[in-house]
Image (spheres, rainbow, N blue to C red):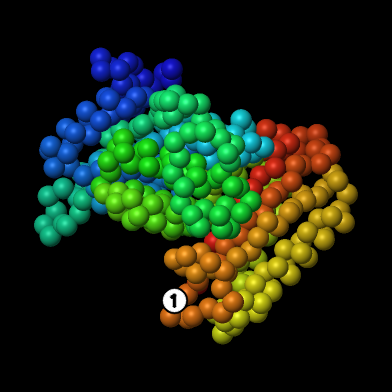
Amino acid sequence: MSSWFSTAANGATNTRDAPFTVFRDVPELRKFRKELFLSRRTVGLVPTMGALHDGHLSLIRQAAGENTDVFVSIFVNPTQFGVNEDLDKYPRTWESDIQKLKELDNELAMAASRAKGKPGTDFCQGRISAIFAPTSKVMYPCLPPSSDPNGDGSFVTITPLARLLEGASRPVFFRGVATVCMKLFNIVTPDRVYFGQKDVQQTVVIKRMVTDLHVGTDVKLGPTVREEDGLAMSSRNVMLGARRREVGLVLYHALKEAEKAYLSGKRLREDILGPANKLVESVARVQEALPPSQRARIELDYISLADVDSLEELQIVDATRGAVLSGAVKMLPIEDPQPGEDCGKNGGDTPVRLIDNIII
């Protein structure tokens, strides 16, 4: 157990010098949530798989601006990883995550103190009240979680959305996402839940689930947070290393090329996506021509031009509705790593999938 914590009498875990509580099981968290409900407090939930970065922190700030209390879940959900995907190597940074949350909560406390009592201030400044960090047994109590498309279990499936884009390459991904989110919503009963635009398809799937299944929570979208050079922040970025990190910008640059074509007046699919595909193909050729000790090879999964609601592919964009430009590339394992080279977490031996999108 982390040195930040001491065990509370109710089985939860209290931080020594931070106000939030870490809950490992459902009954204690539900009891706490009921107390907040009876006190007419509101809860915003930020679901995460840990390895927190500034994108997650921006969603927590957004939630704190719209709710009195923020719950953050940290759970690496096994059912959204395929059989051959990187579950075992997904970054787990518990100590660092808790430190970041402690610092952010202090920031929120100072903001609340500054706003308090100011005349004319219509400002809700919440705090981080709870961290929910369950085990797989807690989240999947009846059967071991399955990553097999035909595996047994209690799952939530949202089709056809779950079969498009990311779902075409990762057939169990959105089944796992929808299932774990439904579980979290049932456990926490948040007034609002917060997701980042980088995972735009995930947000569309969750919005559809909430609507179709009459879940009493509002789904909120936060903007994609990027590094200075444009790379969308992701927990997987720590696995890239310097070589793949630089070449990985190809996806963002490709989407910007497509956006540029749209802004110049292009509306046909081939006119918008053509420049994007051409850029990726060019970068891939350049990398293939380099010696193994220098190159970072990529595989393009897709670049999409889709409807903002259905995510069905578009042949022509209606400018009154806009569209979603999105894509995915796989950064292949580093070849012939050099002495002292920054190869990223896990030494660069794991493929890293990068996704991104731009709303036009």
Q: Is residue 6 left or right of residue 158?
A: left
Graded by Cα atoms within 10 Å as few (under 14), some (14 to 19) or many (20 or more), the crowding at tag 1 reads few
Q: Which residue is mark 1?
A: 321
Is 279 placed above or below 232 here? below
Q: Is residue 225 left or right of residue 355?
A: left
**Front-most of 330 and 186?**
186
Quadrant of the rendered structure where residue 34 is? top left
Q: Position of residue 331 (x, y in %)?
A: 70, 48
Residue at the (77%, 51%) spot, across then down: 297
State whether residue 291 appears in this view: yes
Q: Is residue 62 left or right of residue 338?
A: left
**Front-most of 123 and 359?**
359
Residue at the (12%, 50%) spot, across then down: 117
Q: Position of residue 125 (x, y in %)?
A: 23, 47
Residue extending farthest bottom: 265
Q: Position of residue 222 (x, y in %)?
A: 40, 56
SS at mark 1 in the image: loop
Residue at the (82%, 48%) spot, across then down: 294
Quadrant of the rendered structure where residue 101 is? top left
Q: Is residue 232 left or right of residue 290?
A: left
Residue type at mark 1: give it: Arg
Residue at the (32%, 16%) spot, across then down: 7
**Front-most of 65 and 350?**
350
On-image quarter of the N terminus: top left
State whether residue 65 appears in this view: no
Q: Position of residue 223 (x, y in %)?
A: 43, 58
